[in-house]
Image (cartoon, rainbow, N blue to C red):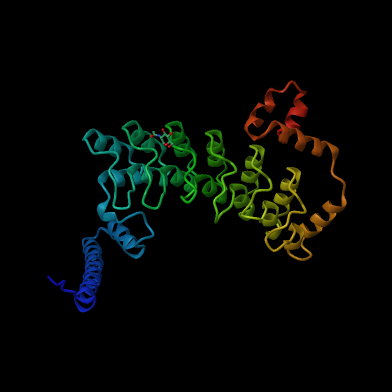
Amino acid sequence: MTDIKVPLGSTDLSNVYFSILALFCFKLFVKISLNLLSYFYIVRGNRKEAARISAEFYDYGKQHGSWADRSPLHDAASQGRLLAVRTLILQGHSVNVLTIDHVTPLHEACVGDHGACARALIDAGANVNASTIDGVTPLFNACAVGSVACTEILLENGAKPQSLVYRPSPIHEATSKGHYGCVEALVTWGADVDMDIPHLGTALYTACICQELECARKLLREGANVQKGRSLDSPLHAAAEKDCTVVVKLLLDFGADINARNTEFQRPVDVAPPSSITEGFLLLYEATPRLLSQLCRQCVRSCVGRDRLHLLSHLPLPARLRRYLQYQ
Ligand SMILES: *[C@@H]1O[C@H](CO)[C@@H](O)[C@H](O)[C@H]1NC(C)=O
């Protein structure tokens, strides 16, 4: 018997081309139908629906999934219609229904900052840890829009406070947008303040890049490592580069190393804009001896260790000293 060898060529290749063409035609067909549908709605006078369809049409891919595969529960949750959500649940709609992109109604409720709807969904058994194909969780959505109510409801019901390393991180998101309440809730429920994401660095580094003073302070009080930024870039480098003197002061207060070198072997003072206020401040700081009280505070805090910082309030010390140790 002889094997018949078909040379890899014409037939296989034309199959591939045919698949590509078919896919292209299908996408074209979908787009045209969407267009027709929105036209139909405009003609019928339903402008709101038309606007929604065209938003979906032009934002293809940016939005969570397409409108077509969203369930009535998704719609009700995203608009915060509690009564409708309750009714749909009573009628037996599954609370964990997914779109193609694995968006759940709970994701929608959180994006819209609809705490009551989120609670109703969770009470009916919605998965608090549900993740879209992009790794977005309801908690991430709540943090992105600064919904403290949703963040707390999710955490109280067992949502994990942080994601895996390469997934969208709630604490980084909340920090970058200055949503203090969300950062506070995440930390209270055990999110790791030193979580380091390769392309973003730590949450503290994000706070410095985005010049979010209060979030940076919160993270530091909770024991975030003041030296840990993104690879060799320290948070102080980021704040100096942004010429954000208040954050620079805060970091130095928490013991940031003024002589740390980044990958280009530069110190924070070298990356500050020339003759900026921050550069002047750093130069002056270098030439001034540290306060003994500050050095003691840093020493005590590092001896206590990050995981026991919350016990500082139980130390048998004068209230003023205790507050000093807690940076309050
Ligand atoms: C969510 O995930 C965390 C961590 O994997 C787990 O401990 C928790 O029980 C989960 N919550 C629910 C409600 O499944």
Front-most of residues 117 and 221: 221
At x 73%, y 42%, the residue is 254
Vertical side of 30 occupied by 233: above or below = above
Question: To which quarter of the image does residue 92 belong?
Answer: top left
In the orientation shown, which residue stands out farthest toward the bottom? 10
Percent position (x, y) of residue 251?
72, 47
Percent position (x, y) of residue 173?
52, 49
Percent position (x, y) of residue 258?
77, 52
Decide if residue 72 is in sight here: yes
State which quarter of the image contains the C terminus: top right
Percent position (x, y) of residue 41?
23, 61
Question: To which quarter of the image does residue 306 belong?
Answer: top right
At x 46%, y 46%, the residue is 140
Decide if residue 328 is in sight here: no
In the orientation shown, which residue stands out farthest toward the top? 316
State which quarter of the image contains the N terminus: bottom left
Vertical side of 25 occupied by 200: above or below = above
Left or right relative to 144: residue 106: left
